[in-house]
Image (spheres, grey):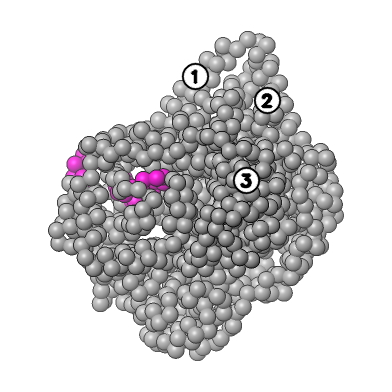
Amino acid sequence: MSFQSGKVYHGFELIDQYPIDEVKSMARIFQHKKSGARLLHLENDDDNKVFSIGFRTPPTDSTGVPHIVEHCVLSGSRKYKTKEPFMDMVKGSLQTFINAMTFSDKTIYPVASRNKKDFYNLMDVYLDAVFYPSIYEIPEIFMQEGWHYELNNKDEQMKYKGVVYNEMRGAYSSPETILEETIQKSLYPDTCYKYSSGGNPYIIPDLTYEDFLNFHKKFYHPVNSYIYLYGNGDVLEQLKFIDEGYLSNFEKIDIDSEIKPQSPFKSMEETEEYYSVSKEESDENKTYLSLNFVLGDNRDAKTYLMSSILKDLLIESSAAPLKKALVKAGIGEDILHIDTDGIQPSFCVAAKNTSMDKKDKFKEIVFNTLKDLVSNGIDKKLISACINMTEYSLREATGFPTKGIIYHINSLDSWLYDSDPTTHIRYEETLKELRNLAKSNYFEKFIEENIINNPHSSLVVMNPKKGLAEEKDKELQQRLDKHKESLSDKEIEELIEANKKLRDKQLSPDSKEARDTIPKLSVSDVNSKSQVIPQDVIKDEDVTLLFHDIFTSKIGYVDLLFDVSMVSEDLIPYINLLSKILGKVDTKTMDYSELSNEIYVNTGGIKFNTEIYIENGKDDVFYPKFKVKGKAIGDKITSLINLTKELITSSIFDDKERIKELISQTKSRLEMSIFNRGHSVASRRVASYYSKSSKYSELLNGLDFYWFISDITQNFDSNSDNIIRNIKKVYNMIFNKNNLIISFTGDKDDFSLFRENLNKLTDDLDNTNYGTINYNFEKSNLNEGILSNANVQYVAKGYNFKDLGYEYNGNMKVLSTILSVDYLHNRIRAKGGAYGCGINFGRSGNMTTFSYRDPNLSETIDVYDKTYDYVEDLELDNDEFTSYIIGTISRLDSAQTPHMMGITATKNYICNITDDDVQRERSEVLNSKIEDIRPLSELLKTSMEENYCCVLGNEDKIKENKGLFNKLVNLNK
């Protein structure tokens, strides 16, 4: 229908409307007359519909109240009476996305679904949650999700426990989290950005229940909300639903939530901070140095894009001159860009693993390098390359499969600050302007004004301190002990009773009456047919071509998968090392800076990684691959082919200093990622004890690879010739035509162009047949405790159920859903306080349980061991079991970008998983019965009795439980 500006539709006045070509949408900006709520609608033909509601939530301290409110409002509401409607929707919805996110100054609640009925269910649950949560009637919600005093008997030591509390203990195990927080404090000392919206774990217990409720009362009103609708839904119907069900119940009020920018500094501020390292870890060269500058205002479209482009221009790209200068001077093991979010963008350059005595040199090199760029000009090709990098990111919505959510987040980067909500979605004109300005000295002037001559800046020095976390925890325990001593016997009994009430609530099932309040789908709402991804298999001489004819907005995605099964066991880590180096060293015709510019001027990038494909149902048969991934638009596909050929046939590995830099950088990035994916690290490690494919994966990119990188970093100078010899050996072996598979995702015209020019790449490839190595990986029950400075644990246990005589079936997918969102969730997350947990069953037979940011250790293993008992006695009514089936289908039908679809089809081809296999699994899920699930209790029991476990976590906690392990190993050897 036709909309008219100024007209009211179901309580919403249309303020403005216009098309946005960049996202192929009609944008409509509404304001709700009665409540004052704002609403942005992006209408398009995407059937993956998105609803989101956000609120301005500026913190006034570091208790993490915005984060705790985010968790708590999803734990029951006026209409939805179960303990956790959020988890009920996770297990029983066809959602393609469901989550909530706390930022520095805002909190958002996005959901997405392709199913109309499901979409309205999700929208209703979220709207009821944010406006009418049960937090006012049920204080146990705050106790569970935020924090509480844990005391179960009068003789035990009092502890703090809570999901957010432990989540943030995990987050603060990472020095980069502390560095980012310190930078924000240093640049914005008079604003909400000086506080941790997520919560500093040592400050979270200062938050009272009353202050928590007051925060919700103040900020969670429609007048302070930002509502977003995206996709091909009926907007009039959606507006009516939101108005009649919710917004019409509210009157417009005044709320002071304005986000104010920091007043400019008169001179650079200097700040010193400390972070903890393990007592057994060296603290030498572990300092972080960071120079930080406020660039202006995020509401300005040019400044917003410039902050992204500058990051690549000066630090992230291989040709980045500032990074090159700092690395050449030996300032740090790695040079990083640290992101901050808020109304004022920043540019932050940090040196990692350096020393205090390099502070002045660091500052001098940064300013001298930038002054030199301003005086002599920046390479125009580098500027063009970095603009292209930003453009690809914008066009692909950063590669996120539910792209509508990315557009909402981008909209809030201006909308939240009372500016046009589509400023950063309409980026074409700004990019075009920046390309034209690049021909002048605009970029040089921008650097001169916003960095070199900008007093609104800071220098942050962050030093390591051995045992700092232990010191803080000791102070925390003393505080707890003192509090306990201050309590009367009656108050202690009341606290014990409150904890008992909380535990009973956490572990008791919801009543049928409560469950009946949750909106439900039926199996008839589910498509019984699995998606068939288009894939043509073409045998072209020695090469197999896989073509996926999928709409990709004219981007052609090319993946080359080279077989590496001929590489001997001792060289397996070098395969992954090669992926970290390739494209960042010189070739025979270009130095690595020129190469980087050529790649990003002509393509969307060429990346490298390694992957293992496991034969359908056979863990001991696997196909390791080295992947070359590139993307380009239109006739630039020929440039992509030529540049890929340059990389894989002409790279030179003789520059020892450059190789050393890249190895150090690799080690640094691995260190930064370990705690963020600690559950994956522990899961892979434990699987490597009993699984051949997982053992290979562990050598390739697990802890074994991290320790390999750490060793060659430390010993590079004395062993460089051997290291480089091995890199060359692997490089010369793997880039050949034998077993080469090439996957192309895009349209037919682009594929034809690609195929016509492919011989330019393949003709020069070697075709030596090296044969296949038969790796002699034996089971080994290492049961390691990996000692680290983490404040929490990542606990994994598992086994290969095929070795016990069981076969994979789709019923196991349903069991995984039941256990992950019910049994494990209730005991490990809700009761135990861990941030996350789950269980996976694979076609290869590998089963692993895991926990994430877990304060416990032995208690979690005990939960795993008793899983069988729960399954053996499992009782679910038909509605409950149907919800688990639907939730499982949701996982099978997760949102995918076009390229991700091509990757999935390629994986299935290599693993010999047919469309019939995919359909069979789906049918097994849809036809599951409770009678199919209970017998799996024996599989769980016998698997756990094999007793293969691995824990990555706090060194003191692991040592307290050393009897559970066969071996204790330092993460940082």
Residue 83's quadrant in the figure?
A: top right
Residue in the image at 35% along x and 74% along y: 602
- Front residue of 615/23: it is 23
- Front residue of 548/383: it is 383
Residue 107 in sight: yes
The residue to which callout 1 is attached is: 478
Q: Residues within 10 Å of mark 3 (few under 14, many from 20)?
A: many
Residue in the image at 62% along x and 20% along y: 156
Provide the secondary structure element on which disc 2 rests.
Answer: helix
Q: Is 722 on the left-hand or right-hand side of 893?
A: left
Q: Is residue 844 a member of the stretch shown in magenta?
A: no
The residue to which callout 2 is attached is: 499
> Residue 380: x, y in percent?
24, 68
Residue 837 numbered tag: 3
Q: Is residue 350 a member of the stretch shown in magenta?
A: yes
Which of disc 2 and disc 1 is earlier in sequence?
Answer: 1
Q: Residues within 10 Å of mark 2 (few under 14, many from 20)?
A: many
User: Furthest-top residue in view?
Assistant: 488
Q: CA distance from mark 1 to mark 3?
A: 30 Å
Q: Is 386 on the left-hand or right-hand side of 484?
A: left
- Image quarter in which the C terminus is found: top left
- Front residue of 494/298: it is 298
Provide the secondary structure element on which disc 3 rests.
Answer: strand
